[in-house]
Image (cartoon, rainbow, N blue to C red):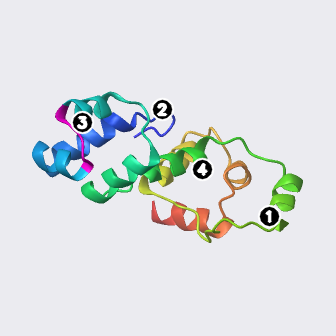
Amino acid sequence: MLFKNIHIGELIQKRVVETDISTERLTKFLQCTEDELEKMYTRKSLDTEILLKWSKLLQYDFFRMYSQHLVLYSPPSSSEYYQKIKQQKTQLPEFRKNIYTVEMIDFIMNLIKTNEKTKKQIMEEYRIPKTTLYKWLKKY
């Protein structure tokens, strides 16, 4: 799975097929018509409230797609800027752990395997701790 270009409607449709949930149940839960349901499958993005409903119904965290995109494709910030932001107080919830999925680990391991990036570059650009990276190297 490439996280660079996310088409959430297609991903939802794949999950619906996997779970074999009836159209009647989907329309009832989402409070929409069959036509609106079909339109959602063609949309590249959806409102977060609707995406949350889909995540609950299909028991799959679709928001992780976007988290992975941020981890893999957001431009690296300078260490000074990162430290400055880290010190600022925020009213938003703070999450302690990064989200490392199997796909992301495979992506990182492939970068090392193909010599596209060094271990040092990966640690700096993706802010992956040295111990975590070396555990992955040992395991994978």
Using the image, determine if residue 135 lies above or below residue 105: below
Q: Earlier in the sequence, mark 4 or mark 2?
A: 2
Q: Is residue 32 magenta?
A: yes
Q: Which x, y percent locates residue 7?
A: 40, 33
Q: Which x, y percent locates residue 117?
A: 66, 42
Nearest-to-viewer mark from 1 and 3: 3
Tell me the tag on residue 86: 1
Q: Residue at x 57, y 43 (%)?
A: 111
Nearest-to-viewer mark from 3 and 2: 3
For the residues marked 4 and 3, what is the alpha-carbon distance in whole angstroms? 30 Å
For the residues marked 3 and 2, what is the alpha-carbon distance in whole angstroms? 22 Å
Residue receiving disc 4 = 71
**Which of these two is toward me, 28 or 87?**
28
Q: Residue at x 59, y 69 (%)?
A: 97
Tell me the tag on residue 116: none
Residues rendered magenta in the picture: 30-34
Q: Earlier in the sequence, mark 1 or mark 3?
A: 3
- In what element is the residue under mark 1? helix
Q: Residue at x 60, y 50 (%)?
A: 71
Residue receiving disc 2 = 5
**Which of these two is toward me, 112 or 129?**
129
Q: Earlier in the sequence, mark 1 or mark 4?
A: 4
**Which of these two is toward me, 5 or 117?**
5
Q: Earlier in the sequence, mark 4 or mark 3?
A: 3
Q: Is residue 94 left or right of residue 61?
A: right
Tell me the tag on residue 37: 3
Q: Residue at x 13, y 42 (%)?
A: 23
